[in-house]
Structures are given as C-alpha cells and as structure tokens.
Amino acid sequence: MGMIGDLLYPDNPDLAEEANEDQKKLQKTHELHNALVTSYRQVADKTRTFDSYLMSILAMQYYFVYAKEDLEDMPDTDCPTITQSLADKIESVALDALSIKMGYNGIKAIYNRLSNVTREGGTFRENIAEGPESVSEELAPEIDSIAAQSEVISSANIDMLTNTSMTGEELSAYATELGEAGESLETMVSSGELGEASELPELSDVVTAGVDATAEVMEGAEAAGEAAAEAGVEAAATSACVGAAAVLGPAIIIVIIVTEIFSAIEAAETHEKLEKALTRLRKMQKQADASLVSLKKAYASLLKGGLADIKAYNKVLKKMYQLEKNEAFNRSFSGNGLTSYANALDGITFDTMSSIQPFQKSVDDELSKALDYIRTHAINDSGMTEVITMIRSHIKENGPDSVDDNFLSAIATDLDTDIKRVQSYYKFSRMLNDIGSALLPYHKQIQTQTPKGSKAPARPAHPEFGKYEPSFQPHPDQFTIPAIGK
C-alpha cells in the first residue's frame, strides 16, 4: 500500500513523515479492531446459542413442577422487554415442545422469584439424612431472591451483547432495563449477606461492564453514522451490520470507513481526495481508539457471561445428578479458556494480536463441548416437559386420582412415543411432588419470617420440612421467594 504522506507531500519530508506515521498508526489500530470484531462475532454466535439452551432448560424446569395454567396466571415482570427478548431467544433454538408461550412464562417465573423445586430437590435428597440444618445451609443460596434471578440477569447481558435484531433505540432501552435489574444484584452484593463464596459479586461486575460498554457504543453510534454519511458508505455500512450484534454496529461502520480511506490511498486518488482522506484518517483514529476500548469491554463481558453460563449449567447438572442419580448428569465443563481470554483482552495490542486466534480456539473448544451436551439435554427435557405439562393440566382439572394407565397410554398414542417413557416421566413428576411437599414448610417459614423491606429473604434458624406426599400438587404462590426491598 502506498503511503499518504509520500503522495501528498513529495517535497516536504516532515509533513510526509507525520502523515505516514498517522497512517501506520491507523493501519495497526484497524487490523486489531477488525480482528476483534471478527472474533467477537464468531464467539457471540456460539455463546448466544449455548445460553439459549441453558435458558430453555431453566424455563422448562418450572413446567416439571407447576401446572401450565398457573404459570400463565402469574403477573407480568418488572422487566417486560428483557423477558420477551429472552423468550424469543429460547424460541430461536427451535425445540419442538417448547413454545414461545412456555418460554415466556418460564422466564417470567424466574423473574417472579419462584422456587425451582427441581433444583432444590437435589439438595434436599442429598442432605436430608444429615438433618434440617444441613439442607437449610445448602438451600440458602438457592432461595436468595436475587440469586434465584442471577442466571436470567446473566442471560440478559448475553442477549444484549449478541442480539442481531435490535435497533439503536431498542438496544438503549434494553440496557436501561438491564441496568435497573442489575441494581438489585448490586444491592444484594453490597449488603454483605452473600458470603465470600458467592459468585454474584463477579456477575454484578460482568453485567455492569456490559451495560457500560453498551452505553459507550451508543455514544459512538451517532458519530459513526455521520462519518459513514460523510464518506459516502452509508448503504455499505448498513448492509454489513445486518446479522451483526447491535453493539458491533458502530465498530463495523468504522472498519468499513477506514477500509475506504485505505482504498483511496491505494488508488492514489487526486490531491484533493487524498487531503480529504487524511482528514478522515485522523478523525477516524479517535473513533477507532474509543471503539476499541468499548469493544474490548463488551467482549470481556460476553466471555465472562459465557463462563457464568457454564458455571450455572454445571450447577444444574450437579443438582440433577443429586436428584436422579443418573450418571449422564455426573459431569461438568471447563471455562478456563473463557477466563484466560477475558483476562487477556485488555492487554492485547497490535503487536500481540496473534494471540487472538489461539485464545478463540480454546474458547470455541470449551463452548462446543458444552453446547453439544446441553443441546441433547434440552431436547430430551423438551419431550419430558410436553408429557408432564399434559399430565399436570389434566390433574389440575380432574384431580390426582384421575391419572391411570389408560390416560398415560392415550398420551403416548397422542405424542407417538413409548408408553414406558411416559410412565417414567409421570414417576419423575410424582417424585417432584414428594419433594415439593417436603420443601413447602421451609418456604412458608421464609415467607413469614422475612421482614418487609429486608435486603434478603430470611434463613430460618430452625428449618422445618414436611413429609413426602405424592398427591401434593405444588402451586407457584406457595414457593414465591420474598423480593429485595419489597
């Protein structure tokens, strides 16, 4: 590529050198910027997909315990945009049995602070022999009102950083909503109620970084748009941004404009056009520098959000193994590559950008392994969800004694599945009824002992648990966790 100073100032070495140095600096910034944008897009796609499956599983678990009709009757959440967007994301993984309505109500159940009996059941079965205190200690993190919502807040952060359909206004509104939800998380973190082992302080930092990066992106979006108009590449910039995460929009526009500047230099345009190119070059350096900072911040938040997802899924697998003793759940996945990349991002420069590819490969390998497994898990759960949802709706209308072999056979025929599978799912739902009945007194203690306006739900000093009742039919109102400050 030619050097703009040599073309503009052949008779003035000082001016030529100054312009050439500006070009070299922008070239280096451009290459690093472009490499990070490309890497971000690839990692974002896989992270978003994994998160979609995780949220599918979490949403479906509420249908293992509560009747569909009861979940539909819950009040709307405080964060309607986030709730609907996450439900749309769940739908995007195209699970046949999980409709958008089920996804929406499952996410809404988390926002309404409903106990996840499926996951709490693992702790209960694992620790009940050691006494109520042991169960209460293990359950405490699960029943913290904001801890119960932490995974959906993390998912919202990933959604914000990877959504391909948001306009600038929608992204800004989403970030505002997430920021408000994150304040509850920060309240719990600063209250000192969590203990040193909690992962919530780290998640609070991740979400804050994501919201801050989005705010910075929005500040730069208008300037990037004006620069695109000035450079005459509006249509190309708009086209290139289609299918890209909204937070990448300004960064992609800057990459396109800088490429156009270099093309003008390469073509050795007229003196007048080269002068304009130099002016744009120097202007774009400032925008590229700012964009690089916000891009790294968003990318680190995305990577740490992916790590939070893997940790959350490992916890799901642990609880399911405790609950079912199924060896398929006796495993976990590593997030070391995600951690390493996130920690290294801020220090990556043009001179060290060759490290991006190996960092990304490590992240890709980790996400691929976890994604392959969680996809199978979610598809299996979707079939179970469909069966159990039909059974619970039938029981709600006709009573627990109405389920017999003829009814289960009819479900098997209707869904074109094996009767033994339907029977095993029914057995699983009855086991969750048992556990729900045993946990109910404990949750009543939490609800009655939590003072109004408390920063955290009460943790009963003398936990009480009930007896197993297979005929028990849990209702969401019975397992609502008190909200912070409400």
Image (cartoon, rainbow, N blue to C red):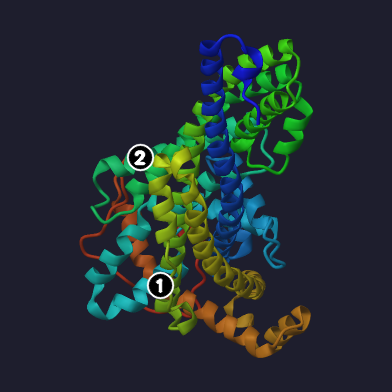
> To which residue does mark 2 refer?
186
Q: Nearer the viewer, residue 159 or 227?
A: 227
In the displayed structure image, the side of residue 78 where residue 243 appears, left or right: right
The percent position of residue 397, horizontal first and vertical second, equals: 65, 70
**Residue at 54% from the left image edge and 77% from the top image edge:** 429
Residue 2: which quarter of the image?
top right
Q: Which residue is mark 1?
A: 318
Q: Is residue 358 above or below residue 348?
A: below
Task: Determine whether 356 is above or below 236 in the image.
Answer: below
Please identify the quarter of the rendering in which residue 198 is found: bottom left
Please tell me how crowded label 1 is: few (under 14), some (14-19), or many (20+) other residues with Cα within 10 Å.
some
Q: Quadrant of the N terminus?
A: top right
Q: Residue furthest front?
A: 11
Q: Which amino acid, mark 2? A: Glu
Which element carries disc 1, helix, strand or loop?
helix
Task: Kindly identify the residue that appears in the image at 63 percent across and 44 percent down.
Answer: 163
Q: Disc 1 vs disc 2: Cβ atoms closer than 8 Å?
A: no
Q: Position of residue 68 (x, y in %)?
A: 62, 63
Which of 9 and 180 lies nearest the eye of the viewer? 9
Three-letter amino acid code at disc 1? Answer: Lys
Estimate the spatial distance between the alpha carbons at disc 1 and disc 2, rounded to whole Å.
27 Å
- Seen in the image, is 316 located left or right of residue 380? left
Image coordinates for residue 173, horizontal then vertical, percent: 58, 31
The C terminus, quarter of image: top left
Residue at image coords 70%, 23%: 228
